[in-house]
Image (cartoon, helix red, strand yellow):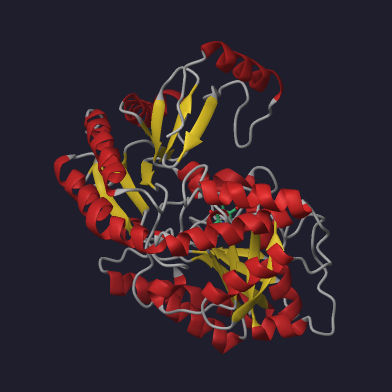
Amino acid sequence: RAAFLADPQAGAAVKAADRAHVFHSWSAQGLIDPLAVAGAEGSYFWDYDGNRYLDFTSGLVYTNIGYQHPKVVAAIQEQAGKLATFAPAFAVEPRSEAARLIAERTPGDLDKIFFTNGGAEAVENAVRMARLHTGRTKVLSAYRSYHGGTATAINITGDPRRWASDSGTAGVVHFWAPFLYRSPFYSTTESEECARALTHLEDTIAFEGPGTIAAIILETIPGTAGIMMPPPGYLAGVREICDRYGIVFVLDEVMAGFGRTGTWFAAEHFGVVPDLITFAKGVNSGYVPLGGVAISAEIAATFDKRPYPGGLTYSGHPLACAAAVATIQVMEEEKVVENAAAIGENVLGPGLRELAERHPSVGEVRGTGVFWALELVRDRETREPLVPYNATGEANAAMAAFGAACKKNGLWPFVNMNRTHAVPACNVSEAEAKEGLAALDAALSTADEWVA
Ligand code: PLP
């Protein structure tokens, strides 16, 4: 493990330049106080004051093999020495190999890979492919979803908090996806929720006009909005509806893909093959920006004789692709996907459920693999969230106190609204997962003080 020596002076300089010149994403610039990070390795990172944190966020849920994996760092260095960059129109070794390895792991006949620089850009291109393939324009997406921060992706995102930037792309229609704990359909069982959600989707399609809809896009397991497991049969039902109306089915696996749920792609849990899969994040643990779209044979054939109108200067960058090849090799060699499944099954799942039994602030535990959410409530009966939607300042005090308590106990938590997500690296060890559970246990005692 790399030594970390406290160097508060260096940290202060990093912080001062950041506050003077870095304009941070999704933030009120005058209200933030970003931690100056000195280094990271595996599941941990540390600051300049000598504090070390267990990262239960995997960055933004993307460092699936942890920080500074030596094999991936070496592969990037080696590629930089050989051929640091080359334009997308050429066939180069790391790009060819990354595409082959990804295509081998995607379900069904999704065997062509269009590379992008990240997740939002993958969503933009999936929508463009669907529109050109069908000759239709509308896109249906779910409320309580996140699909990215660019023009179309932000409007497809089902979260009003995000729309302020760029409201109202023509042709984007939102519908309700199933979520039994806060059911939009007032259901009381999973099967009722599934049936009602599918009827609602059919009704939406009938009113919009099936012949106008290019695509339905869903996160296989919605992540940012709360790690909500779709009920059995829902995704298969959506697949069947898409087939019936000639609608392209896009599964967004930017967050859920590449091992996070204990399988290569989350679609495997549900036995569903979509027409397009968007991916990013875990494909190379974010060591160099990379994303993409995995494309079915039928949609790929649309562009056999007709040019596909899309791409960026750095699409499929050799350094990013070399990192993807090394990441996938590491995941195979070190059985990282199997580890994520086992940690979910044997440590995080049982551990989080046990916390829920003892802490009245926990309303629900849900997830799989290394992809878990705890929903914190003021009242278990009414399910009133511990803080109101999009709360800031005093109104958010309970979650702020919970987050501070995690950090005091050496855990860097993912906190969003009234939820905390336990989303460590897919190669997190059993001991590290247990360390995280112990810190959460202590922090939940703080949250319990806000229970009504
Ligand atoms: N889609 C999903 C499901 C995501 O979770 C995210 C990011 O969190 C995105 C798309 C956007 O990815 P990026 O931030 O790489 O553009």
Q: Position of residue 60 (x, y in %)?
A: 51, 44
207 w.r.t. 98: above or below: below
Q: Is 227 in front, or is 76?
A: 76
Q: Residue furthest left?
A: 358
Camera sees residue 169: yes
Q: Tell me the quarter of the image containing the N terminus.
A: top left
Q: Is 436 in front, or is 318?
A: 318
Q: Relative to residue 34, is residue 211 drawn left or right? A: right
Q: Relative to residue 144, is residue 174 drawn left or right? A: right
Q: Tell me the quarter of the image containing the C terminus.
A: top left
- Number of marks drawn: 0
Q: Is 114 in front, or is 249?
A: 114
Q: Position of residue 296 (x, y in %)?
A: 63, 80
Camera sees residue 149: no
- Looking at the image, which residue is at 67% across and 18% down? 17
Q: Residue 399: name its quadrant.
A: top left
- Looking at the image, which residue is at 37% across and 63% down? 229
- Looking at the image, which residue is at 27% across and 48% down? 430
Q: Is 10 in front, or is 209?
A: 10
